[in-house]
Image: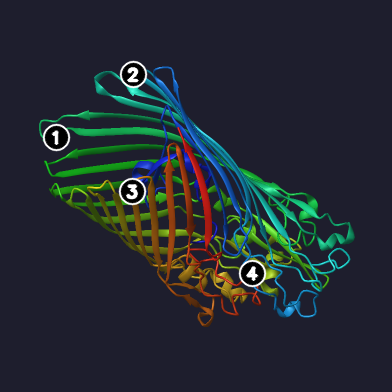
Amino acid sequence: MGRGSAPADLNAIPLSAIDHIEVLRDGASARYGSDAIAGVINIILKSADHGGSISSKYGQYKKGDGIQRQVSGNTGFALGDNGTLNLSGEGSNNDYTNRAGDDFRTSSIGSTTYGQQVFRQGEPQTHEGKLQYNAEYSFNDAAEFYSFGGYSKRRGETAAFYRPSNASNNIAAIYPNGYLPLINGTLEDTSLVAGLRGELADDWHYDVSANYGKNTYELRTKTINTSLGLNTPRSFDNGTLTNDQKQLGFDLSREFSAAWLPYPVSVSFGAEYLHQGYQIEAGQAESYFQTGSSGLGGFRATDAGSYSRHNFAQYLDVETNLTEKLGVSAAVRHEDYSDFGSNVSGSLSARYDFTPQVALRGSVSTGFRAPSLAQQNFTFTSSQLIGNTIQEAGTFPAGSNVAQLLGAEDLKPEKSRNYSLGLVLQPLDSLTVTADVYRIDIQDRISLSSNLVLNNTAINYLRSNGVGDINYTSARYFTNATDTSTDGVDLVANYRYQFDNGVRWNSTVGYNYNHTKVTDVKANPAILDQLGVNLVRVDRRERIGLLGDTTPQHKLTLGNDLTFGNWALHSNLVRYGEFTSYQADKVNDQTFSAAWLLDLAVDYTLKNWVFTLGGDNITDKYPEKLNDFSSSGGNLAYSTFSPYGYSGAFYYGKVTYNW
């Protein structure tokens, strides 16, 4: 959980559009590219050309807040005799929850709200709309057109720390009782894929495609800028972040027979071209003037920029059976980045079926992940007024002047080795069991450095080396300062049974063990020691916690579905193991106990209608409260690392109509 990652947003896809999900646990960089270090999640969209459903859901938390309203639908159409069009949509409106404690910060003593609940900690307020389509049209055996894509827009609101009435970042004439800065983000996601696939002469299969994606994140705040006095705006445009990519791909595949091999060889190869872009747009001037908008300052004109790169890749994938029981595959991929040079990744995997009921599988692979454009170029500077002096704090690109002067090196790609071994059992037609062990070693892991608090010697050093007459009091940057190793175990058992009276029972048991540790930390930059900066580039909290184990190492799930007549009962029991929130000083660490959570739902089907009543975390389980050190004077009652949140039980009703 290193800070500063730039993951894909799977929430942009409506659940009503998803048919099923496939998970490839092995490292797959050799086939799918640099983002597949640990495996691949393949989301299969619905493609039916008829029928559909529409549903409405309403629920709220046991505390009475966090009301959720959702409407979703899916339908399919035939495009003549040779094509299909499947459409899905979803809209939701969710209220926020608040589990904050009372404000007993020493800085709030004497304020009008001391001892009251003024913070907001919980689920955010969100408004969301999503659309998705999936289309296919077959001209003949030689050519089938396909296309899928989607659009989503999500608005969310979270809160910063409360500013009490007597705080220096409050203007009492505007807010006599203090105020809560609100941060509003609008996330807009667009994706479009189109391609042509089919058969060529001599049993060749081809697939040529184009892919476009764009994501924008617009930030606005409802707050004040105390530097502007009574003339301050009450809302600010803080800037926008944009990611986009354009991809072209061409794939060919065919089976070959060789006299010296007992079975045909399946060969696929192809090439891809990828262009990526990243932009930081500045906010309005008032959002970063002197101290900036309180709670979240705006991106400055000096932070803004536009960046791009391209990558050309080729891959080869070969699969065959060496015997009736032994299947093997190998893949290799070459990538050439305009900003990071070239790399070759490879993988080997095999499966041996001892009997139809027992099989052993394993794989070895290498991986490669180039730093994202955001990790290379993200810049954000904020200010605070101390006495009569403006002091600056910032996150800087590793290649910037400030970061380089403080010991940063140019970012390098992450490289990985992935090992896995698995056992597949099917002792009964109705029972399957899989057991997999894995290890992922990552070299030169990219993460955000610790916050480097700068003394006067360091500030003067920056000034004398071209930074300018600026009081940078703290700085951080992205770095390849660590290597990590992850060991894990996945156990899954699935049992299906139909009783003579028509009752159907499906039960799934799953267990996961996952442990990540930092195996190497690069030496602290000598310049930091020379300047007398006490903090290290990667501190204990980052090394043991954020890059190591912040989430539970153990997770156990037991899911059951029981169908009888018009009724269906669904249950999911989950045990999360204990987890620890690590701090810079060991004395402030806090370990949270293991917890059992139970979700229940019951369905009743009446012709085309399905009526559902359910609850998540029906026993209203909460994690232990944070200790005094971490709770900001009692305001932040619960750890943000809780794997099951801290809003308590949620109950809902749902109505679905199918046709």
Q: Amino acid at mark 4?
A: Ala
Q: Amino acid at mark 2?
A: Ala
The extreme bottom residue here reads 587
Q: Quadrant of the C terminus?
A: top left
Where residue 38 appears, x then y in whole percent? Answer: 38, 53
Q: Is residue 392 left or right of residue 98?
A: right
Q: Nearer the viewer, mark 3 or mark 1?
A: 3
The earlier-in-sequence mark between 3 and 4 is: 4
Report, in whole angstroms, how far the alpha carbon at label 1 lies from the one at label 4: 64 Å
How would you rate the neighbour count of disc 2 (Cα within 10 Å): few for under 14, some for 14-19, many for 20 or more? some
Q: Nearer the viewer, mark 3 or mark 4?
A: 3
Report, in whole angstroms, how far the alpha carbon at label 2 lies from the one at label 1: 26 Å
Name the residue located 68 percent from the left edge and 61 percent from the top edge: 159
Q: Nearer the viewer, mark 2 or mark 1?
A: 2
Report, in whole angstroms, how far the alpha carbon at label 2 lies from the one at label 3: 46 Å
Where is mark 3, residue-wise? 564
Where is mark 1, residue-wise? 263
Where is mark 2, residue-wise? 142
Q: Amino acid at mark 1?
A: Tyr
Helix, strand, or loop for circle 3?
Answer: strand
Residue 568 in sight from this viewpoint? yes
Where is mark 4, residue-wise? 100
Q: Nearer the viewer, mark 4 or mark 2?
A: 4
Q: Is residue 585 left or right of residue 333?
A: right
The earlier-in-sequence mark between 2 and 3 is: 2
The earlier-in-sequence mark between 2 and 1 is: 2
Residue 311 in sight from this viewpoint? no
The earlier-in-sequence mark between 4 and 2 is: 4
Q: Nearer the viewer, residue 542 or 162?
A: 162
